[in-house]
Image: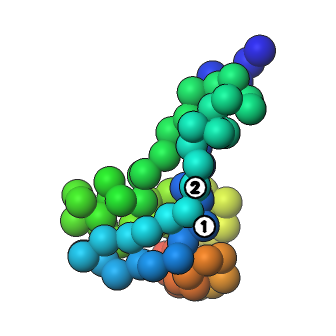
């Protein structure tokens, strides 16, 4: 009862910023099965706004892996691999 919604980006099958991105996801089915509001297409929205289509990864990487002693480079090997450089704090 504490969960208001679920974010689902789907599985990336084509990704070419700034042209666009294509994710496989059935948001309506997720909504029906969970009974929750579903937030989707945030990769496409990020590209439309001039981003690279992974708006959550750099923020989460900085929050989880930021360090006072050293910078870090993180490799995300999900559907499309990408690097995040987290500078020393």
Q: Is residue 62 visible?
A: no
Q: Please tell me whether mark 2 sits on a helix, a strand or a loop.
A: loop
Circle 2 crowding by C-alpha within 10 Å: few under 14, some 14–19, many from 20:
some
Q: Is residue 38 above or below residue 76?
A: above
Image coords of residue 41 (percent x, y): 43, 51
Q: Which residue is mark 1?
A: 11
First in residue order: circle 2 vs circle 1: 1
Q: Nearer the viewer, residue 50 or 19?
A: 19
Q: Toward which corner of the image does residue 20 lie, by quadrant? A: bottom left
Question: Is 58 positioned to the left or the right of 10 in the image?
Answer: left
Whether label 2 touches label 1, CB < 8 Å? yes
- Disc marking residue 25: 2
Question: Is 76 positioned to the left or the right of 18 in the image?
Answer: right
Q: Is residue 83 above or below residue 58?
A: below
- Disc marking residue 72: none
Q: Residue at x 43, y 68 (%)?
A: 22
Circle 1 crowding by C-alpha within 10 Å: few under 14, some 14–19, many from 20:
few
Q: Toward which corner of the image does residue 1 lie, by quadrant? A: top right
Image coords of residue 86 (percent x, y): 52, 74
Q: How many marks?
A: 2
Q: Please tell me whether mark 1 sits on a helix, a strand or a loop.
A: strand
């Amino acid at each position: 009862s504490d969960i208001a919604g679920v974010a689902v980006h789907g599985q990336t099958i084509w990704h070419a910023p700034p042209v666009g991105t294509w994710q496989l996801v059935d948001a309506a089915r997720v909504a029906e099965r969970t009974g929750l509001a579903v937030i989707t297409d945030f990769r496409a929205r990020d590209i439309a706004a001039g981003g690279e289509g992974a708006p959550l990864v750099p923020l989460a990487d900085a929050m989880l892996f930021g360090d006072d002693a050293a910078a870090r480079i993180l490799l995300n090997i999900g559907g499309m691999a990408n690097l995040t450089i987290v500078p020393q704090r």
